[in-house]
Image: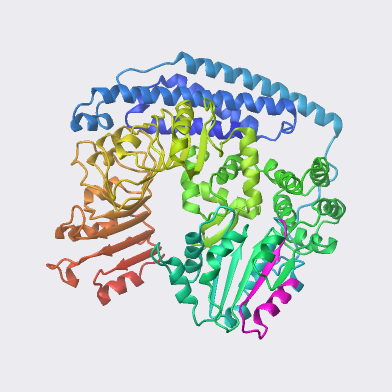
Amino acid sequence: MAAYAALVSVMNIIEQMMSHPCLSTVFDKKQIISLGEKVDALLDLITNPTIDGGSKEASDLEKQIASAAHAAEDVIESHIVDQIHAEKKQARTNFMLRRWQGRNRPSHKCSLSDLQQIIEEMDGIMRKGAELKEKWLAREEQATHGDMDVVEEKQPLTTTTGKASPVGLEDDVIHIMDKLTIHQPKQQIISIVGMGGTGKTTLALNVYENSFIKEHFHIRAWATVSQQYSAKEIFSKLLSSIGQSGSENDLGLKLHQTLCGRRYLIVLDDIWSVEAWDEVRRYFPDNGNGSRIVLTTRLSDVASDCGSTSCITMKPLKKDQSWVLFCRNAFQQEHCPYPQLESVGNEIVRLCRGLPLSIVVIGGFLLKSPKTVGFWEDVAKNIKSIPTSTEKQEILDVLSLSYSHLPPHMKPCFLYMGIFREDREIRASRIIKLWVAEGFIKPKRAQMLEEIAEGYLNDLVDRNLVLVGRHRSNGKIRSCRLHDLIRDLCLKVSEKDKFFYAKRALDNMTKERRFICHDFIKSDDVPEMSDALKSAQLLRSLVCRGFKLPVVFKLLRVLTVVSDCSAEDVMQNLNLRCLTFRPSYSSLVWLPSSISFIWNLQTLTINAKLVVAPIEIWSLSQLRHVDCTQIYLPRPPPPPNDCVVMGNLQTLIKTVNLRLSEEVCKRIPNTNKLHLIYNDKLEGYEECLFDHLHNLGSLHKLQSLKLVVSTFPNSCNADQLKCAFPVSLKKLSLKNCSLVWNDLTIIGSLPHL
């Protein structure tokens, strides 16, 4: 896993460097080509299943590959940042700053001795890999002259369609529905209790989504609580699920007012303590009309202490139930279509011990695996070999088989999802941008990296490792989440493989490449944390909250920070690719002109009332996504000065008073998502801005457009506000644009809307 991620990252660095307007001449071309060839060969070695990946020799080889690839990354990016620092020292005026991205290219080519040593080391690793491959093939040929147990692939005779009923939960569904709808005016609390992975949430969700229940209750609201909770967050989730919101200080009161006088159903999923219940219970009024509250918890004492009037305890599935659930996930039907696999399939199911989560995940893994008796027997043997441990560890060990058999390109993407907080809904666009920024996505011709990454996410969903939260209007995934046991697996494997570190800071972090700290750092702990981070000079990703960055990180790629750092401080990290910044000091953020030195910035997200960008932002050729609360972009420099085409730019969200001139459209030809705001109370407003909206028609890749006019120009009438919409549009949102009927006729003719 680490080897694949590191090799693809090197491949991406080479491609980004060679396409950069200034850096393509920094290194000796022959040396870079030689490195690229070695990286391709090593990638082929570890992705080609001709080596026993479970052997110690293969594991040692992968570690050597990862180490060499990481070293190559460090040497290349260190040299690039050193070059930029040298240029930066010479820059004394904004004019000279702009020259960095324009005509002031380094005049010399550099052949690095360190990089040459790494290339030679990769040569040696390739020879070892070839020897290991020959040895393994010889061993395989000795063991067998062919796989005689291959089952002919065939399409299932029938497949389950739509939403399947929950296996083994039918009686529980009926029991809970009786408790919810029985004529008992007093408020009732029903608890569902069981260990992780037994189907508590599945049971609650099936009842919650039942059509009869939807009709019976006036209001239904759902919130996942989890171990780390806040009452405000619970209220916010409940209000959000019924399409409402409120100010941060009166969320509980708003919820209480909404529920008063109505028959409601509240589901609090995954509640861990009676304290959490005590903080929210008084906001659930007893209206004497049959309102109900459903709790799911792993702890029986929590259920009793919360005053449950009824309690359902989840039990392991019976043998026949387990088999049906397994077949649904392994074959997408309720029976096994391959007689040869029934025996070994039943053994795999038996070893899952009736735990639905284990059955679903193993089934999802086998759905995309070879339908051979030999392969399935290996899976069963691996499950048997897991040593006896605690219940949770046993589950993790079973689930880890699905991780072990993921294709190499999906392993780093799956593990990376563990950086998000427990029970947190993860925006699909966010995780995709992070995968791209980390360099996990191997490029393919004619496909954007984000499109490839979206395919990876869909595959993880198909394997039941990732749960879909919400869908977009076009059917694509809007948000997703991890079951907490799956997240625990991510954390366990990541710590073991040193993929990322998600605990408190270490005394010495010299070898850490990713550090995640979600909790706000207490003032007493800041010195210790700062000292630890100062040693982390190889750090590539940092998520932290509540304190200033103690040092500039030379190689940092991904930074998510909530603190009182200044934008100038953050922009000193010249290797950044993905920046998510929430300043605590001001609602207005002025980006410094030195942003032009961040050579590979791809994603810019700043949560502030208004972000004002400098003119140098138009020279960021690698920029892919700008997604700020609101951002003002000045006019780009006129040609021929610094005429950089931002061909990678795909999303430009909430740009304020953008003059969409012909020159601007030429610079952003591949933008597919655009959100424009025109407001006379914000930076750069002029009535003549509306004269340029006809240029929208030249953005031929645009699929989603949102146009918000906060103040319609006094000098314009409806006939003067002319927008030209590209035929590529699939989604259109217009607010206060004073459309006339002719405009609607034009909109109605858009073929893909």
> Which residue sits furthest right?
343
Q: Is residue 194 magenta?
A: yes
Q: Residue furthest bottom?
A: 183
- The structure's colour scheme is rainbow
Seen in the image, is 443 located left or right of residue 648? right
Q: Is residue 353 above or below residue 707?
A: above
Residue 162 in view in this figure: no
Q: Position of residue 272 (x, y in %)?
A: 63, 57
Report the span colored magenta: 172-195
Give the vertical position of 120 relative to 552 (above or below): above
Quarter of the picture containing the C terminus is bottom left
Depth check, front residue: 356 or 620: 356
Residue 80 appears anywhere in the view: yes
**Residue under the point 28% across and 24% down:** 87
**Residue 48 located left or right of residue 744:** right
Residue 729 is situated, as x and y percent measured from the top left of the image, at: 37, 61
Q: Position of residue 115 (x, y in %)?
A: 48, 18
Q: Say which residue appears at 49% left-offset and 37% top-offset.
A: 439
Q: Is residue 512 above or below residue 387?
A: above
The image quarter in which residue 554 lies: top left
Q: Nearer the viewer, residue 309 or 313?
A: 309
Rendered location of residue 679, percent (x, y): 22, 60
In the rendered image, which quarter is residue 109 located in? top left
Q: Quadrant of residue 40?
A: top right
Extreme residue in the left direction: 715
